[in-house]
Image: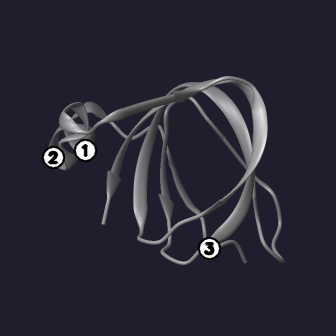
Amino acid sequence: MSQIRIEAHPDAARLAKLGVESWPEWEKEASEFPWQYAEKETSYILEGRAVVTPEGGQPVEIGKGNLVRFPSELACVWKIIEPLRKRYRIG
């Protein structure tokens, strides 16, 4: 079971309630790198596609329109397949 939770294509009301438009933005070119989350993170994928593989877990594909929750203490490897742009909230 993956620790990463994906909500596919939440509607505008849901995104507004979360305040996604006010979250900082992050972007990254196609690449692969290890990452560890010190705190939980919620991200909304604006563009692109990636595969996130938790340490000891199954790969999870994320892409445009996904609202993704990463738990704190998650160690993983990001493989960005198409340049990614996301908004995110820590904590």
Labels 2 and 3: the sequence-earlier one:
3
Amino acid carrying label 2: it is Lys
Q: Nearer the viewer, mark 3 or mark 1?
A: 3
Q: Is residue 83 above or below residue 18?
A: above
- Disc number placed over residue 14 in the picture, else none: 1
Q: Nearer the viewer, mark 2 or mark 3?
A: 3
In the displayed structure image, the side of residue 78 where residue 64 appears, left or right = left
The quadrant of the picture occupied by the N terminus is bottom right
The residue located at (69%, 72%) in the rendering is 2
Whether residues under marks 3 and 1 lie with C-beta atoms below 8 angstroms apart, the answer is no
In the displayed structure image, the side of residue 63 where residue 32 appears, left or right = right
Residues packed near mark 1 inside 10 Å, few (<14), some (14 to 19) or many (20 plus): few
The residue labelled by disc 3 is: 3
Residues packed near mark 2 inside 10 Å, few (<14), some (14 to 19) or many (20 plus): few
- Disc number placed over residue 35 in the picture, else none: none
Q: Find residue 41 and report its horizontal and vertical position in percent.
A: 42, 60
Q: Find residue 22 and report its horizontal and vertical position in percent.
A: 18, 35
- Disc number placed over residue 17 in the picture, else none: 2
Q: Find residue 78 and report its horizontal and vertical position in percent.
A: 72, 48
Q: Is residue 30 above or below residue 34?
A: above
Q: CA distance from mark 2 to mark 3?
A: 24 Å
Q: CA distance from mark 1 to mark 2?
A: 5 Å
The residue located at (67%, 23%) in the rendering is 29
Q: CA distance from mark 3 to mark 1?
A: 22 Å
Whether residues under marks 1 and 2 lie with C-beta atoms below 8 angstroms apart, the answer is yes
- In the structure shown, which secondary structural element does the residue marked by tag 1 occupy? helix
Q: Quadrant of residue 62?
A: top right
Residue nearest the observer in this picture, 4 or 34? 34
